Image: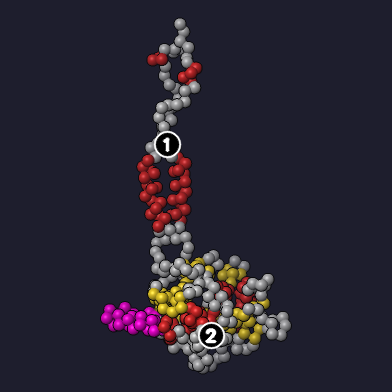
Amino acid sequence: MAFIPSHRKRHKTDTGEVRLQLTSMMDMFTILLVFLLKTYATHGQLIIPSQDLTLPTSAIQHPPELGLDVTVSSDWILVNGKPVEQTQNVASQEGHIIPRLRDELLRYAKRAVKMEEMYGAKFSGKVTIQGDKHLPYRLLIRVMATCGQSNYPNMRLVVYKIEG
Amino acid sequence: MAYRPSKRRTYGSEWVHTNITPMMNLMVVLIPLLLTSAEFVRLGVIELNLPPAALGPEGKMLAELPQEERRKLDLTVTITDRGFFISSSLAVLGGLREGEPSIPLLNGEYDFPSLSVKLFEIKKRAVNHFPDSDRIILMAEPEVDYQTVVSTMDASRSIRVNGKVEILFPDVSLSAGIF
């Protein structure tokens, strides 16, 4: 009898083993890798933006620097993470200086001057101010005046960089 | 014709599945590593240096500089809720009508490009005549937004003209004038 090739076996598609299709996942991972390589940053984060405020945006190109951190949100004024004064108290004050902020800054300044005497690390007088973008101008001016009067005249305003 | 199964040969090349497990290995290590060091939001800082004893008698932020031989420009931009007023030690740049801001609001928004253009004109005329032609003083009403002040600083720092970036007034001081 002539052997007739079986029709049934021709349609047999189930080979009995399951193969995991990883090629599409590889495609996605490759694209993700290329994107992340592009946004790779080598300088790390010197300033951690505070969570309860939105920084204003600016086209400035200056990179961030290290300094004493003064955060002005809509509720509290914090120095290096420590709450110092409530924003609404400032509005009712007279004059340009915020007393509690000034006292706190003077303490830091005194400590920094002592460190300078002991270790020789020069006191730069730098303070980085993080403020919510909807802060009123008078609050900003008062904070800056207080910093200026407390041996911290070099102010740096932290902003989000946008294309200029 | 080979009808017997043992006599048959498979023609055509085998499709060889490359083993991508090692590559997946690499991806699973690299991707989280790069994710943690990726910066999606870039921060910048605007420098404002005050001379140490900053407050004068009226509470202005500027230190009183010694009198100089040549007259100073003292270019000032005042941000109000009606627009920008540009003034200097010589004159106030008038708007369309008396008492109107030099650069009024455009559609209810601050018109930063026009401010840059106006400042560019002033810069061109002032650059050789005044010693402080790099300096600008910003004043604002008490309720003006921080973002508006920062955007004004941007607009007065430089302008892009014909594809080239021209420096206007990079030295910014804030003044506490109106309270």
* Residue B49 percent coordinates (x, y): 46, 81
Residue A50 is tagged as none
> Is the residue A42 above or below the residue A154 in the image?
above
Whether the magenta-drawn stretch holds residue A112 is answered as yes
Query: Are the residues at dot 2 and dot 1 in contact (C-beta closer than 8 Å)?
Result: no
**In the image, what residue occupies the spot 48% across and 18% down?**
A8
Q: Is residue B166 visible?
A: no
Write the start and end of the magenta stretch as one range: A102-125
Do tags 2 and 1 sit on the same chain? no
* Residue A72 percent coordinates (x, y): 47, 75
Quarter of the image with the N terminus of chain A in it: top left
* Residue B98 percent coordinates (x, y): 71, 85
**In the image, what residue occupies the spot 39% across and 73% down?**
A81
Whether the magenta-drawn stretch holds residue B141 is answered as no
A22 or A96, which is in the foreground? A96
Residue B176 is tagged as 2
Q: Residue furthest right?
A: B97
Residue A20 is tagged as 1
